[in-house]
């Protein structure tokens, strides 16, 4: 079992904290370096004090005991969207929007529903700013286990929310694309939520490799097929497989001889098999490796399971 070491630098946290109004930003920046390096989310709820979430759960922000107001929430949106909050609210059907640096802002409030679909929010009641981080080398301990007979095996990364699936996938993309220990591969990334590459002005904000092509903001199923047809990838990657269209696209790509990297929410293989969508995915035999991420004593640990076999690597 391998362990993912968390980064020492707190620069990503400070970048996310810069989205906050002055008093809260100063309180967040005053947190000790260890807390900043391990913090995963900044939580703002109207009528409640702000909190910071991490392996420890949620904690109040020292010196920021004042209750969050609707005006505070509106100001965060103005800062995060560069005064285009109405545009962000129109994206609420996804439940979040991504800002420069790859940080994800989740939104709750009073929904405006038309023809049975959520179109916008009339009043924002809470925000969750997820701190985006890259951890170069996160995949070093498991990467060799994903190869067999000189070929990269299609791999599914599994964990509960917030346990590091995207971070691991991003580093795998980087390492394969840059040729870490092996010849570089062309990687196509279907980055529907903008979290893998954090594209900003057409330039990835994260290090995703010299031979990686990114299609962001596009539904994964459509994006995977566009990359397959247009960019001649050797590897296709997508974060969070959640829909039948995603699985259909993966099946098409697998039949074209492309290796696949993807993530899914779940605790373990047994958890996946209990859900019809993933049971069908496993039955297709597309993936030959399963990487399970677990959190133990504040650290993330990896297990690599060859699918179809009864042993762990």
Image (cartoon, rainbow, N blue to C red):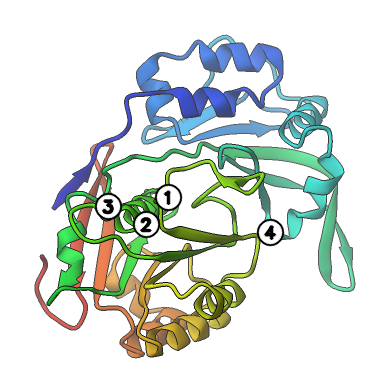
Q: Which residue is mark 3?
A: 294
C-beta proximity under 8 Å, tags 2 and 1:
yes
Residue 136 point in image, percent of width and height:
32, 40
Q: Nearer the viewer, residue 68 or 177?
A: 177
Give above or below for 19 relative to 134: above
Give the structural element (helix, strand or loop) at label 3.
Answer: strand
Give the Cα separation between the discs numbered 1 and 3: 24 Å
Residue 168 point in image, percent of width and height:
34, 52
Give the Cα separation between the discs numbered 2 and 4: 24 Å
Q: Which residue is mark 2?
A: 173
Which circle, 2 or 4, is nearer the viewer?
A: 2
Residue that appears at 57% across and 13% down = 27
10 Å crowding of disc 2: few (<14), some (14-19), many (20+):
many
C-beta proximity under 8 Å, tags 2 and 3:
no
Residue 62 point in image, percent of width and height:
52, 13
Query: Number of labelled discs?
Result: 4
Which circle, 1 or 3, is nearer the viewer?
A: 1
Give the structural element (helix, strand or loop) at label 1.
Answer: loop
C-beta proximity under 8 Å, tags 2 and 4:
no
Which circle, 4 or 3, is nearer the viewer?
A: 4
């Amino acid at each position: 079992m391998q362990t993912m070491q968390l980064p020492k630098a707190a620069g990503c946290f400070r970048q996310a904290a810069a989205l906050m109004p002055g008093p809260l930003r100063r309180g967040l920046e005053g947190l000790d370096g260890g807390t900043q390096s391990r913090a995963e989310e900044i939580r703002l709820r109207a009528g409640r004090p702000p909190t910071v979430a991490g392996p420890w759960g949620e904690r109040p922000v020292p010196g920021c005991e004042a209750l969050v107001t609707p005006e505070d929430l509106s100001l965060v949106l103005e800062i995060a969207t560069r005064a285009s909050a109405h545009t962000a609210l129109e994206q609420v059907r996804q439940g979040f929007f991504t800002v420069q640096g790859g940080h994800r802002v989740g939104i709750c409030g009073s929904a405006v529903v038309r023809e049975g679909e959520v179109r916008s929010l009339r009043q924002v009641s809470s925000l969750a700013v997820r701190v985006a981080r890259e951890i170069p080398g996160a995949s070093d301990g498991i990467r060799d286990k994903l190869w067999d007979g000189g070929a990269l095996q299609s791999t599914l990364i599994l964990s509960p929310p917030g346990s590091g699936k995207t971070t691991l996938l991003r580093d795998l993309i980087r390492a394969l694309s840059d040729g870490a220990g092996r010849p570089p591969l062309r990687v196509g990334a279907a980055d529907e939520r903008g979290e893998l590459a954090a594209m900003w002005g057409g330039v990835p904000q994260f290090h995703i490799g010299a031979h990686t092509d990114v299609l962001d903001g596009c539904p994964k199923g459509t994006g995977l097929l566009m990359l397959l047809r247009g960019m001649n990838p050797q590897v296709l990657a997508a974060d969070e497989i959640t829909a039948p269209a995603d699985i259909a696209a993966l099946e098409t790509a697998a039949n074209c001889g492309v290796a696949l990297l993807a993530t899914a929410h779940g605790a373990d293989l047994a958890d996946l098999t209990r859900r019809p969508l993933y049971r069908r995915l496993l039955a297709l035999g597309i993936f030959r490796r399963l990487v399970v991420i677990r959190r133990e004593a504040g650290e993330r640990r990896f297990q690599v399971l060859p699918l179809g076999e009864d042993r762990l690597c």
